[in-house]
Image (cartoon, helix red, strand yellow):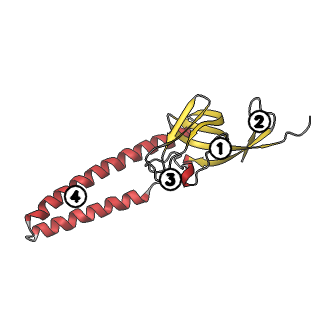
Amino acid sequence: MIDHIYPGAAATVTCRTVFQISQKKFYWESLGIFLLLIAAAVTITWLAKRGASPRWKSGRIAVVLISCLFVASLFKGYFQDLKLYRAYERGEFSLVEGLVEDFRPMPFEGHQEECFSVKAKRFCYSDFEGTAAFKNTASHGGPIRAGLRVRIAYVGNDILRLEIASSETRPPD
């Protein structure tokens, strides 16, 4: 927990960190899918070499192409996440704190992003994004609600750290 007083606040504000990118781990599920695709490509190649029908040859090409696209996507996501991790570690991010305004939750089924603003900064994200940045929508148990006092460390639209404030009465002076 981090204690600090928000500028102009009439109370001491205690902040609780609910998300921090440095605590996120690599998505091993993605690697598992890649390994399954490679296994499928090897199996189809083995069957094609054993004299199976020409269908296996086109199937092998399709699996190899899908595997290549998946690997490219995996590397792209990995390097984007690495860039965010490094920005956080180096302190190369912006901060905004204030009340959550213009909150638009994502429906449980998805089909649109969850969005909100803090002061003039707008954030949008979805549970279905492949990113290490914050993406936990309210419809799936996320903490963001309208009127909530937050402090956000971010790069672009990516939330690297999310702190939620809970007010306590300031002791008399």
How far is mark 2 from mark 1, CA to CA?
Answer: 13 Å
How far is mark 4 from mark 2, CA to CA?
Answer: 56 Å
Residue 89 appearing in the image: no
Q: Residue 163 carries which label?
A: 1
Residue highlighted by disc 3: 108
Q: Earlier in the sequence, mark 2 or mark 1?
A: 2
Q: Disc 3 marks which amino acid?
A: Phe
Tag nearer the camera, 3 or 1 = 3
Instruction: Using a 10 Å C-alpha cutoff, classify the residue at mark 2 as few (fewer than 14 neighbours), some (14 to 19) or many (20 or more).
Output: some
Q: Is mark 2 on a helix, strand or loop?
A: loop
Residue 21 is situated, as x and y percent measured from the top left of the image, at 55, 47
Tag 3–tag 4 contact (CB < 8 Å)? no
Q: What element carries label 3?
A: loop
Which residue appears at 42% of the width and 59% of the height?
Answer: 28
Which residue appears at 49% of the width and 41% of the height?
Answer: 84
How far is mark 3 from mark 2, CA to CA?
Answer: 35 Å
From the viewer's perspective, is 94 left or right of 98? left
